[in-house]
Image (tube, rainbow, N blue to C red):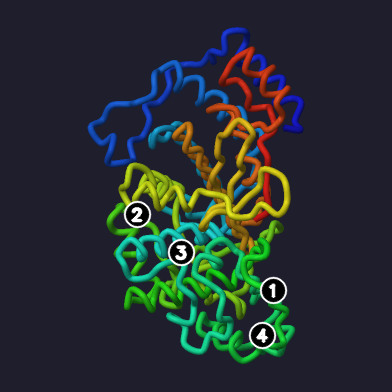
Amino acid sequence: MKNPVLVIFIIWLYGCNGQASVGKPHPPKIVTDSIAAGYSTISVSELRHYKAVIEGFADSLFSNERFNGSLLVAKNGEIIYEKYNGFIDPRKKRDALTPSSPFHLASVSKTFTAMAILKLQEEGKLHINDTLTAYLPGFPLKDVTIKSLLNHRSGIPNYVHYMEKLGWDRKRPISNQDVLDFLIANHKRIQIAKPDKGFSYSNTNYALLALIIEKASGQSYANYLRQSIFEPFNMKDTYAYTIADSARSLKSFFSNGTPYAFDYLDNVYGDKNIYSTARDLLKWDQALYGGRYLQQQTLDSAYAGYSFEKPGIHNYGLGWRMFLLDNHKKFIYHNGWWHGNRAAFYRLPDDKATIIALSNNDYLKVYSSKAIANIFGSYSNDPEEEKAAEAENPNSALSRKTYGGKR
């Protein structure tokens, strides 16, 4: 944390005993079926502690007119802090953002695509070790598997970069089928690496996975996700974008307030194009516990690292980025960035905590919300720093480093 004023504030807040001195907290908002009986799993002292520190952090980072978005922090599925700041259109400053205002999730959409693929595997409609030729007629790369798309080890580069360079007309919107057809027609001109030789993050992988979902399920991508995920988990404000949603979708803006225009890449889905709210993302987070959506064995495979060519804590599972920390904790997450849409979805399964930050005006600081993780446990990878902090208070480490990653 680079803000010395904030560090001083946090040290003062906890004092010697780690207790926050604040007034009576608001009761947590119950948002999951598992705690629908109306009782809280968090003690009053814990809630005071969490709420006060998060408020201090949020006020330093998000309390200004530049932040147009939402921030939500939860523990055990209970919301312990949420903030909504700004407007549907930040230029006009009317129609304030609310908990039901869906944001474009950008690459956080990949978590839904990946889990839908794994659900289809559990349903016996595909296997992730299958090659793509079984699902995508004419696919030219014989050794690429569904798994190598999921963990970004297919060797196929990003269509966002090569299609225009190889002649695609920017005036013509690209569809998922266009991504496939262009790859089939031009694979000898595209610099494609051998599969499973290394990690290379590529939106092409997830555009193709969306087509596989459609082939295996017999439904459109949007309908399968709606019936398989959004409706069962009461995610009423979440949808996969189609042209029919143009009028209702939240627009995105440059940091100076200028709106982004629709462009030729905006129709492709699977890699992006899911809209959701912080509260609905919390429901998604909770659906991924206790076998509610996927079996634990399947989830374990999704949260495992698959790329170890380079040393370090950063890795990628099946649809999830992660930090594999030296203390054996896992920080499971995905960031998103498309046009002015910025999304951060941080999950701490060891501590049953969730941090979600969304913005549609290119507000980079949404990714700094990862630092909140350290109020729930040790998410620093510096052993000496961690040891010193734990000796003082196991929950007083918000000012320590929480390691970031690429989007």
Q: Is residue 241 above or below residue 348?
A: below
Q: Is residue 54 left or right of residue 170?
A: left
- Residue 405 visible here: yes
Q: Earlier in the sequence, mark 2 or mark 4?
A: 4
> Which residue type carries mark 2?
Met
Q: Nearer the viewer, mark 2 or mark 1?
A: 1
Do the residues bearing badges 2 and 1 touch, measured as CB atoms within 8 Å? no
> Which residue type carries mark 4?
Arg
Residue that carries the numbered disc 3 in the rendered image: 113
Q: For marks 2 and 3, give the CA distance.
A: 16 Å
> Which residue type carries mark 1?
Ala
Q: Is residue 385 left or right of residue 37?
A: right
Tag 2: Cα neighbours inside 10 Å, few (<14), some, or many (≥20)? some
Question: Helix or strand or loop: what does disc 2 sit on?
Answer: loop
Across and down, in percent, residue 90 comes to: 59, 56
Q: Nearer the viewer, mark 3 or mark 1?
A: 1
Q: For marks 4 and 1, give the CA distance.
A: 26 Å
* Identity of the residue drawn at 48% across and 82% down: 133
- Residue 343 visible here: no
* Identity of the residue drawn at 36% across and 35% down: 29
Tag 1: Cα neighbours inside 10 Å, few (<14), some, or many (≥20)? some
Q: Nearer the viewer, mark 4 or mark 1?
A: 1
Residue that carries the numbered disc 2 in the rendered image: 235
